[in-house]
Amino acid sequence: MREHREAQKAVGTMVLPMVVGVDGSEPSLHAVDWAVDEAVRHGAPLRVVHASLWERYEGAALADTPDVASDAVTGHDLAENIVAGAARRAAQRAPMLEISTGVMPEDPVSALLREALRASAVVTGVRGRGPIRELLLGSVSLSLAARAPCPVVVVRGSAQNRQAAIGRIVLGVGTGTTAPATVRYAFREAAVRACEIEAVRAWRRPAHRTALHPPRAGEPAHAEEDDAAALLDEALDAVAQEYPGIVVHRTLVEGSARHALVTRSSASDLLIIGARRPRGHLGPQLGLVGHTVLHHSDCPVAVVSQQE
């Protein structure tokens, strides 16, 4: 199937792995589950990675590591137990999946950015403790989303949202942040999941358009909305022709893009946004919309880097 083959990012004949970063916490185990399912969908191997300096980077994880043995008292033992526990969980979920592991004696951002150079995607969980856990995003996930060259998925939300039980992907289409790579990623995901896409484009009326400053004579009453519709069509049409079987709903929203995307995330399996990488900069620029959805989305968020 063409869509399936295109979804496999490869070097030569080697399919690049789905990389998941783990720290033993419950959110990272949710990330493992999501990464396993995603690897199976795309026919890719899974790589489970732990950076042994993770605890120094974001705080001790021992209080929230159900798969780590209580007698793991050394740093080496702890790291090995974290990776082994995550790998066992992955194997139980998908017995035929090819799984490799890695423990790196460095901080998680450096380790996962290196892994991202040879990964189809990097997957992490949200980070936090207690009742507000799902509202928090750790510095590792945020740094990766802002700097990784491959797609980064931050796994968050309820079990229903994480398990692709809804059948809908939301694609945020923004000015200058939705290159063909981001749109193609959304269509590939929809193809392997056999689900639909809602492409969302927000627009605003200029601030000067008030009762005291009406539109100029002859100017269309809905010029901004029409422009937004044209931009939405321009972003989608070329890629949509490659995937004629995918149902796409094109949604125009007057107001805040970040509010529109967060609102729709509760009824979605995956929220996809692009991140610009201006030439001369070290990494993509997330912007306000990116930061908001990464912190508040009710479903997993994929950030796709694109070179300007």
Image (cartoon, rainbow, N blue to C red):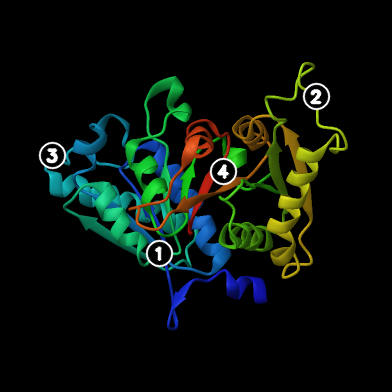
Q: Residue at x 41, y 33 (%)?
A: 137
Q: Nearer the viewer, residue 255 or 187?
A: 255
Task: Give the Cα separation between the discs numbered 4 and 1.
Answer: 21 Å
* On-image quarter of the N terminus: bottom right
Nearer to the camera, 49 or 272: 272
The residue indicated by pointer 4 is: 162
The residue that label 2 is drawn on is 214
Q: Nearer the viewer, mark 4 or mark 1?
A: 1
Q: Are marks 1 and 3 in contact (CB under 8 Å)?
A: no
Name the outermost residue toward the front: 217
Using the numbered discs, state the Cα–Cα distance from disc 2 to disc 4 in whole angstroms. 46 Å
Residue 161 seen in the figure: yes
| Label 4 vs 1, first from the N-terminus | 1
Q: SS class of the residue under badge 2?
A: loop
SS at badge 4: helix
**In the shown orientation, is residue 177 left or right of residue 116?**
right
**Mark 1 or 3 closer to N-term?**
3
Q: Could you say which is closer to the camera, residue 28 or residue 248? A: 248
Q: Amino acid at mark 3?
A: Val
Q: Secondary structure at mark 1?
A: loop
Query: Mark 3, residues whose alpha carbon is within 10 Å: few (<14), some, or many (≥20)?
Result: few
Q: Which residue is mark 1?
A: 119
Q: Position of residue 17 (x, y in %)?
A: 42, 66
